[in-house]
Image (cartoon, helix red, strand yellow):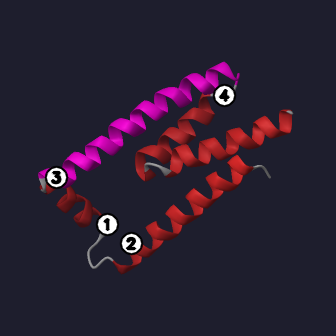
Amino acid sequence: MNKTLLVLYAILLSFLAFTVYSLSVSEQPFFEWARELMSVPATAQVVLDLYIACGLILAWMFHDIRKRGKSKLQWMIFACITVFAASIGPLLYLILREHQIQAAS
């Protein structure tokens, strides 16, 4: 496993662990928590910024998948993950992409 994969896995696993922890200690249901985030302009701006960035990443992912001759279904799977889990989708895509690049070498 190369250094890039180690870094990507470390980021993904750390983020997943923190996500599970934060959801487990939250005293409110997920959708109530999300609604509260959007009710405060400062946190709503951060959430919107995250989704704009994820949209840009999805556009790059789409072009990358087409350029590499992969199925659009693959993009749709990662797009769904990204819509519902933000950064987790692109991290998973980058890990899969790196594995595919290594296998082709």
66 within the magenta span: yes
Residue at (27% x, 79% y) in the render: 27
Residue 42 marker:
3
Dominant SS in magenta? helix
User: How far apart in space, not on screen, are marks 4 and 1 (Cα)?
Assistant: 33 Å
In this rendering, the label closer to the viewer, 2 or 3: 3
Name which of mark 3 and mark 1 comes first in the sequence: 1
Magenta-tinted stretch: 41-69
Q: Position of residue 53 (x, y in %)?
A: 38, 37
Name which of mark 4 and mark 1 comes first in the sequence: 1
Say which residue label 1 marks.
30
**Amino acid type of disc 2?**
Leu
Residues tagged 1 and 2 counted as in contact (Cβ below 8 A):
yes
- Give the residue at the far front of this rendering: 3
In this rendering, the label closer to the viewer, 4 or 3: 3
Instruction: State left or right for residue 59 relative to residue 46.
Output: right
Callout 4 secondary element: loop
Say which residue label 4 marks.
71
Residues tagged 4 and 1 counted as in contact (Cβ below 8 A):
no
**Amino acid type of disc 1?**
Phe
Name which of mark 4 and mark 2 comes first in the sequence: 2
Say which residue label 2 marks.
23
Q: Position of residue 2 (x, y in %)?
A: 77, 49
Instruction: State left or right for residue 13 relative to residue 31.
Output: right
Residue at (49% x, 39% y) in the render: 79
Callout 2 secondary element: helix
Name which of mark 4 and mark 3 comes first in the sequence: 3
Callout 1 secondary element: helix
User: How far apart in space, not on screen, are marks 1 and 2 (Cα)?
Assistant: 8 Å
Name which of mark 2 and mark 3 comes first in the sequence: 2
Q: Quadrant of the C terminus?
A: top right
Q: Position of residue 4 (x, y in %)?
A: 69, 47
